[in-house]
Amino acid sequence: MATKQKNHIPISEKLSDNENFFKEKIGVGTSFDLGIRKLKVLNKEVHIYYCNGLCDTQFIIELLKEIVDINDSERQRAQAKQIIENRLIHHQVTPVESLDEAVDQLLSGLIVIFIEGESSGFVVDVRSYPGRQPEEPDTEKVVRGARDGYVENIIVNTALTRRRIRDERLRYEIIHVGERSKTDICIAYIKDVADPGLVELIRKELKAIQIDGLTMADKTVEEFLVKQGYNPYPLVRYTERPDVAATHLLEGHVIIMVDTSPSVIITPTTFFHHVQHAEEYRQSPAIGTFVRWVRFIGILASIFLLPLWYLFVIEPSLLPEKLSYIGPNEKANIPTIVQLFIADIGVEFLRMAAIHTPTPLSTAMGLIAAVLIGEIAIKVGLFVPEVILYISISAIGSFATPSYELSIANKIARLFLLLAVAFFKVPGFVIGVTVYILLLIQIRSLNTPYLWPFIPFNPSAFLQILIRRSVPGSKVRPSIVHPQNPQKQPT
C-alpha cells in the first residue's frame, strides 16, 4: 500500500470525544489554520471542522446559513441527520465512518461535519487551493497554439486535459502517496486504448511507494517508478502542455499527474520522445519536418561536434586539404582540451546563473558574460577564438533540445567523449561513440527499448520520426505502447 495500514477509529456519538481526538491528533486549538465551529441544530450539537487556506470561505458561509435556518423551519429532531444532509447544498457530500478518514479529508481541504448522537459524519468538498492561473509554459512555447499550461492544482490539470478529450473512456484514478504528505497522484489513461498491463504496472509501483512525503512531487515519483539510479538519461517525459499530454493519451500512453506539480509524467517514452516539440505539429508537415531536422542537427552537434573538432585538432592529417583551416591558427598558453572543459563548464555557470538571477538583472549578467568570455578571455590568451566558436555551437544545440533533462545528459556524454579522444585519439572517438550507443541500447523504461524505433528497427515508425506526417495520413498508434486499439481513425 502507499501508506502503512491504520487502525480505523470509529466516530464517537459524543462530540467531545471526537474533539479531543482532533486536538491530540492534528492540533486543533494549537495550529491556527485548523478551526472548529460549534452550532446547535434541533437541540443537537453540530461540530464543523475546517482548514483555513485550503477551503473556499464563501461555500462554508452558505452551508452555515442553510444549517442554521433549519431551526426556523424544521421540528423533527429524530431526523436531524437526514435534514442536515439535505441542507448541505453542495454537489460533493460524502459520508465518513472513521476519524482517521475524517482527518485525511480535513487536511486535504474538505470540511468535516459531526452530529451529536450519530456514529458517522459528512465531508463536503469545498477545496480552494492557492495557486496561479493556467499560462503558457516557459520551456514549451509555440508560435501558434494554445497558451494554457498545467498549474500546481491537480483538479485544474485534470480539467484542462478532459477539456481536450471528452471521451467517456478517459479514466482518472486517484492514489494517495506519502505517510505524512498524503499527496494526490492521478493515473490518467483511455480505457480501450492504453495497455492494461502497463496501467496495472504503474498502479502497482505507485502503491508500493513507502516515503514520508513527496515534497519534490513528480520527480520523486519518477525515481520510484523507473529506478533510474545514476543513469543521466531521462526515462520519462515531462510536459506542461495539456495538448501534448492529450496527444499522448490518444496514442496509448499513460499520464501521471502529481498534485503541487505544474508538469505531468508521460510513460512509457523513448529517446525520440524527448526530441519532439509541439511547434512541429503547429506548422504544416513540410515546415514541421524542416524544423525537426534542424533540431536533430542541433542535438547531434551538442554531442559530437566538440569531440570531432578536437580529434581534428590533435590529428590534422585526418582532414582533407580543403578543410585544413579547421583547428586553431595560433598557439595557446593552455592546452586545447583544458580550454574546452573550462569553456563548457563556464557555459553551464551562465545557465545556472540565468536561472537564479532576477529577471531585471539577467540582461546585465548576459552582457558581462559576453564581454568576459567573448573578448577579454581571448585577449589575455585564456582561449583561442575557435574554442569559443565551437563551444557556442554546442551550447546552442543543447538549448535547441526540447527536453532539459536530455540536454544535460547529452552534455555529460560530450565531456566523456572529449576525455576519450584526449587519451586515445581516433580509437578513443570510435570506441567512445560505440560504447555511448550501446549504453543507450541497453536502457529500458518500463520494459520499453530506449532507442525504438531505431533499435530494434521499425521502418514505418522510424520514417515518422524523420518526417512529420500529416494528421490524416497518420492512422496507426505507436506499437511500442501496445495499444488495445491500434487504429487512430476509423478505416
Image: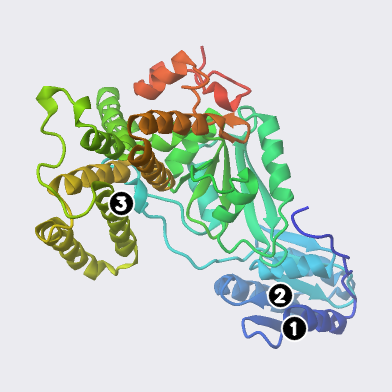
Give the amino acid type for the residue marked by disc 2 in the picture.
Ile
Mark whose residue sits in front, 2 or 3:
3
Identify residue type, mark 3.
Answer: Phe
Q: Residues within 10 Å of mark 2 (few under 14, many from 20)?
A: many
Q: Is residue 216 above or below residue 453?
A: below
**Would residue 25 appear left or right of 269 to someone viewing this image?**
right
Amino acid type at circle 1 is Leu
Residue 416, compared with residue 57, is above or below; it is above
Q: Mark 2 touching mark 3, by CB under 8 A? A: no
Q: Describe residue 85's horizontal placement relative to residue 363 as left or right.
A: right
Q: Earlier in the sequence, mark 1 or mark 3?
A: 1
For the point 70% across and 38% down, the residue is 201
Determine the CA span between mark 1 and mark 3.
71 Å
Q: Secondary structure at mark 1?
A: strand
Residue plotted at (65% across, 72% down) = 63
Q: How many numbered dots are placed on residues in this image?
A: 3
> Is 225 or 239 nearer to us in this picture?
225
User: CB under 8 Å between callouts 1 and 2?
Assistant: yes
Residue 115 visible here: yes
Q: Which residue is mark 1?
A: 39
Identify the residue position indicated by label 2 in the image: 67
The percent position of residue 258, horizontal first and vertical second, equals 58, 54
- Tell which tag, 1 or 3, sits nearer the viewer: 3
The residue drawn where x is 51% and y is 54% is 156
- In the figure, is residue 300 to the left or right of 122? left
The dot on residue 341 is 3
Q: Tell me if label 1 and label 3 are in contact, CB under 8 Å.
A: no
The percent coordinates of residue 354 (x first, y second) are: 29, 62
In the image: residue 320, left or right of residue 480: left
